[in-house]
Amino acid sequence: MSVDGNLSTGIIVESMKIVDTTFDTLSPTASINFTPDVTFAGDITAARIRIVDNKIEAYTANDSLILLANGTGSVVISGLTYPGIDGQAGQVLSTNGSGHLTWSNVVAGFTGDYNDLINKPTIPTTVFDLGITDGTANQVLKTDGAGHLSWTTITTNSLGHITVTNSTLNTTDAAITFTPLVNFSGNATVTGTVTASSFASTVAGTPTISSSTNITLEAAGTVIVSQSPFRLASFTTTERDALLAQNGDMIYNTTTNKFQGYENGAWVNLV
């Protein structure tokens, strides 16, 4: 090794020049190699990068710190190997579980078998799985609109002005109007007044209107029986005499084969 120069102008050691605290090479394409390892007691500043303790930072204000591998090498940080190129828009970094990160597409939803999931939650099958105590039979869960549920007994449902209580329809209006027609497959029992433009039977058999007391046919004009004969009730004389008759009653007497009416307190033949 040869040494030339002085401290004021610099010392040349082979191909390296030392001026004050600066090491430089005599060739612009050469580099300085330290053998063996060199230990620095202070910070290391190299152009735009500074090493302080265990931190590497950009030395120039507002500059970026770029980690770049050589050739096919990779950037490894804390045992994680990062991809050397950017992914596609919307992709995320995904690990293979062995420290290698790659760009992957985000799966929109789970499409496999639910039983293949790890740490899968239990699917609730009863209200007990939701932490809710049971109510009594036929109660329903009702919300207060603020996220609180409670068991409630439903006895009345409201449909506008119509209420349904068990099997009873009621209304706060004067009457219930059914539109369109209402068909009864069984018997219809009426305790109030039925108002209709007509009554028609469309099934086989003879329809019957019955009452435990009297049935009153009332019209502003005339009660008319059309398109069919009007048949009176038939009784024998014995059956007739057992009736609680009133003036104006009429029957057909099958014993005498006569039309009879109750007139002035007694049964008389009409013809």
Image (cartoon, grey):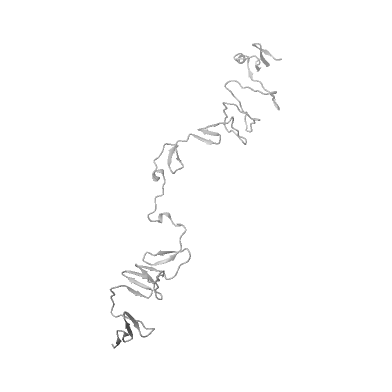
At a point 41% along the width and 54% down the height, the residue shown is 115
Question: Farthest residue in the top direction?
Answer: 265
Q: Nearer the viewer, residue 52 or 86?
A: 52
- Among all residues in the image, which is located at the extreme front? 8
Q: Residue at x 41, y 64 (%)?
A: 94
Q: Nearer the viewer, residue 69 or 201?
A: 69
Labels in figure, total: 0
Residue 178 picture location, percent across and down: 60, 34
Residue 253 appears in the picture as rendered: no
- The image quadrant where one finds the C terminus is top right
Comparing 13 with 83, the one in front is: 13
Image check: 268 left or right of 121? right
Q: x, y (%) of residue 30?
A: 37, 83
Residue beneath the point at 43% across and 41% down: 149
Does 74 sit above or below residue 147?
Answer: below
Question: Which quadrant, please, contains the N terminus?
Answer: bottom left
Q: Nearer the viewer, residue 216 or 178?
A: 178
Question: Quarter of the image holding residue 208?
Answer: top right
When asked about the image quadrant of residue 18, the answer is bottom left
Up the image or down, 125 lies above or below 207; here it is below
- Can residue 76 be spotted in the picture? yes
Q: Position of residue 100 (x, y in %)?
A: 38, 67
Percent across and percent down for residue 44 are: 33, 74
